[in-house]
Image (cartoon, rainbow, N blue to C red):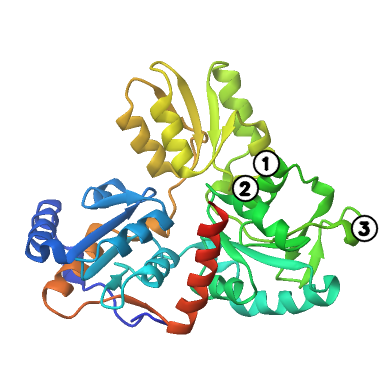
């Protein structure tokens, strides 16, 4: 389905370069490639890499930007594999997408394997009939997006989940939401007033429904048993601790956090929402933010007039995102300069067709 030259590994010589040499050669390669190159940097990317990005943003926004940059023959995506897949899905045929380290994956996306999803769909249709429409978070593989597209469904982001779910419920009685159960639950309950009793969890490990609280006839949300490994680590204890230490602090979290954490927070929203919330906050305000540590640290640096801290003091960064480092970025750049690009992401044309179908439905639903 996806051509990824997984046998290629970073040449050791790149590991031995000094910070100064890495910076010099990265800047040199960028200058040589000029307008033929665009570097995209996800908000969760480490600071020493995102400094080279031409554009920063979340996964879908960056993929859209890459597709608009028609002069760019090469798009280097400093993110994770599903993001590079989406970029290739939206890019022009002549553009190539490179992921500097092919090991930069996403544990959430990996929790929805296409074979498991196809098996689940057959079993769920057997149980509920033709009353289900699939919706997948954009943090999913191209194969899952294509599956959703083939079955009349759509994608969503954490910013437009409410609008997309509203559209989906107009199509069918029930939604199969992939792959993050928390975004699905928090959106359905917090923004659409769907009670928890009308939600169940599908476990791909047991191929069974879990957390069934009432009559299956009343079920409206079927939540895939997946989660973000970073956001799930935030707990209500963390909230209690920061509020006990400072009653004035406001807790701001991402909806990939657990239901209990979102309910106890002062505000919750997408990465873009979090950034704009901090930008608009008054000087002197205090914030404990429950999202990826690189973004929180960057917000603290960019807004020194506000007190900004991570909700938990023991959180680590997104480990797979952080696999993209300067040696890998330089290797990717110099391979393009040499005319032999490494780590190119190529999605199968049929997968692209159905993925675009799912994405197009999302754009229409969000209007």
Q: Seen in the image, is 149 located left or right of residue 174?
A: left
Mark identifier at residue 201: none
Q: Nearer the viewer, mark 2 or mark 3?
A: 2
Q: Is mark 1 on a helix, strand or loop?
A: helix
Expressed as whole percent of the image width and height from the top left, the position of residue 131 reads 79, 68
Residue holding disc 1: 191
Left or right position of 81 against 93: right
> Residue at the location (56% across, 72% down)?
144
The answer to whether 142 is drawn above or below residue 25 in the figure is below
Residue nearer the viewer, 36 or 260: 36
Whichever of labels 1 and 2 marks the residue nearer the N terminus, that label is 2
Q: Which numbered disc, 1 or 3, marks the residue closer to the eye?
A: 1
Q: Are marks 1 and 2 in contact (CB under 8 Å)?
A: yes
Q: Which of 221 and 154 is in front in this view?
A: 154
* Of 356 and 199, the residue lying toward us: 356
How far apart marks 1 and 2 lie (CA) works out to: 6 Å
Which residue, given by chain and number where applicable, does mark 2 sit on?
162
Q: Position of residue 321 (x, y in %)?
A: 39, 57
10 Å crowding of disc 1: few (<14), some (14-19), many (20+): some
CA gap, disc 1 to disc 3? 23 Å
Q: Position of residue 140 (x, y in %)?
A: 53, 65
| Residue indicated by mark 3 | 215
């Amino acid at each position: 389905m996806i051509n990824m030259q997984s046998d290629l590994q970073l040449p050791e010589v790149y590991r031995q370069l000094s910070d100064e040499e890495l910076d010099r050669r990265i800047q040199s390669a960028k200058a040589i490639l000029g307008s033929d190159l665009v570097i995209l940097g996800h908000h969760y990317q480490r600071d020493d890499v995102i400094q080279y990005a031409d554009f920063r943003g979340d996964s879908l926004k960056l993929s859209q930007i890459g597709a608009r940059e028609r002069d760019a023959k090469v798009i280097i995506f400093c993110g994770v594999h599903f993001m590079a897949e989406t970029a290739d899905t939206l890019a022009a045929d002549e553009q190539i997408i490179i992921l500097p380290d092919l090991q930069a994956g996403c544990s959430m996306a990996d929790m929805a394997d296409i074979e498991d999803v196809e098996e689940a769909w057959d079993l769920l249709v057997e149980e509920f009939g033709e009353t289900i429409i699939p919706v997948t978070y954009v943090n999913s593989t191209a194969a899952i997006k294509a599956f959703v597209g083939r079955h009349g469904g759509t994608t969503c982001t954490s910013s437009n989940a409410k609008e997309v779910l509203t559209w989906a419920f107009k199509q069918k009685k029930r939604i199969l939401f992939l792959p993050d159960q928390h975004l699905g639950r928090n959106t359905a309950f917090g923004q659409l007033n769907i009670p928890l009793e009308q939600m169940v969890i599908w476990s791909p490990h047991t191929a069974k429904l879990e957390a069934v609280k009432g009559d299956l006839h009343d079920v409206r949300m079927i939540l895939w048993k997946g989660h973000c490994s970073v956001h799930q680590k935030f707990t209500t204890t963390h909230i209690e601790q920061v509020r006990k230490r400072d009653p004035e602090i406001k807790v701001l979290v991402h909806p990939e956090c657990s239901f209990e954490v979102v309910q106890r927070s002062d505000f919750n929203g997408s990465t873009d929402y979090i950034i704009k919330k901090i930008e608009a906050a008054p000087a002197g305000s205090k914030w404990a933010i429950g999202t990826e540590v690189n973004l929180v640290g960057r917000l603290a640096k960019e807004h020194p007039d506000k007190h900004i801290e991570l909700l938990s003091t023991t959180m680590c960064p997104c480990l797979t995102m952080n696999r993209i480092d300067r040696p890998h970025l330089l290797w990717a750049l110099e391979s393009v300069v040499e005319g032999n690009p490494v780590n190119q992401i190529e999605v199968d044309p049929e997968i692209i067709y159905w993925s675009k179908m799912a994405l197009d439905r999302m754009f229409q639903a969000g209007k």
